[in-house]
Amino acid sequence: LASRIFKPEPTIVKVGDIEIGGKNIVIMAGPCAVESREQLFESAMAVKRAGAHFLRGGAYKPRTSPYSFQGLEEEGLKMLSEARELTGLKIVTEVMDVHSVEKVAEYADVLQIGARNMQNFSLLKAVGRMNKPVLLKRGLAATLEEWLSAAEYILNEGNKDVILCERGIRTFETYTRNTLDLSAVPAIKKLSHLPIIVDPSHGTGRWHLVPSMAKAAVAAGADGLIIEVHPDPKNALSDGPQSLTPDNFESLVKELKIIAEAV
Ligand code: PEP
Ligand code: MN
């Protein structure tokens, strides 16, 4: 179902009047985690002003350590939907387990499956039964074939609105948090009809690498980007080192528009 051979024409995922996989680049931006109402609203207004279409932010956070901030859970979801009211931005947020699928779907416009859950097959089937688009991140060490098989689980349950997200894979390199595999963009375009966006924030782990990789992703044919933006990256509760300030994000969006027109 995910294959180009099965469906030659590209899939366009519609969220309200936004089309992912259409002519325009779709930009999702916001903090790694929802930390407070003030932090979220400040982020939301900044990314809206800069030209983003979606607000991102995790209310349930898959942290490596159980002692790290785990997210505000339903309280965070409520703040996200308040931020949608305030700005008109669509909401993309992570659903971490089968039990919270219904709850997250009440608040989100797009359900995000994190890299660590790419092969959580019961979760994939559960979101496959929902009537909400799914953003499927590539697993930490997943091949393109494994990633498309994960998408297949969602499609096979009847949900046709799957968006793939390249977010870097584990290699021997340690300077960057992950190695962003931009060749995945044209490769997926060849193998599949599904739209693909790129996450240069988790892909590099360093904010100063984000603008270059975001521009390269658009040049490679990505349908959109998901970028971490925080009003005060130094004091962020998660992923501060890879988060852009609102000012840096705004400059990047201007540059992206020029590249998108040239592609
Ligand atoms: C995130 O988007 O904040 C996140 C946890 O991403 P990933 O699942 O790609 O690590
Ligand atoms: Mn993050």
Image (cartoon, rainbow, N blue to C red):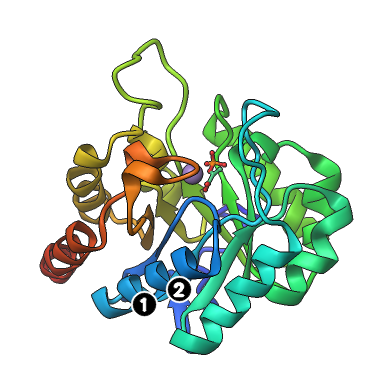
Give the answer, above or below, for where 97 lies relative to 253: above
Residue 68 x %, y %: 61, 33
Q: Residue at x 48, y 50 (%)?
A: 32
Residue 220 x %, y %: 25, 50
Q: Residue at x 58, y 34 (%)?
A: 139
Quarter that holds the N terminus = bottom right
Q: Amino acid at mark 1?
A: Met
Q: Amino acid at mark 2?
A: Phe
Give the answer, above or below, for where 199 lies relative to 82: above
Give the SS element for disc 1: helix
Ligand 2 within 8 angstroms of badge 1 C-beta: no
Give left or right: position of 152 versus 58: right
Q: Residue at x 61, y 72 (%)?
A: 79
Q: Residues within 10 Å of mark 1 (few under 14, many from 20)?
A: some
Q: Residues within 10 Å of mark 2 (few under 14, many from 20)?
A: many
Residue 21 x %, y %: 43, 69
Q: State the mark number for residue 45.
A: 1
Q: State the mark number for residue 41.
A: 2
Q: State the mark number for residue 143.
A: none
In contact (CB < 8 Å): disc 2 and disc 1: yes
Closer to the camera in the image, 110 or 29? 29
Closer to the camera in the image, 55 or 173? 55
Residue at the extreme top: 172
Q: Residue at x 67, y 56 (%)?
A: 72
Quarter that holds the C terminus = bottom left
Give the Cα distance between marks 2 and 1: 6 Å
Give the SS element for disc 2: helix
Residue 80 x %, y %: 59, 72
Q: Is residue 15 in sight in this rendering? A: no
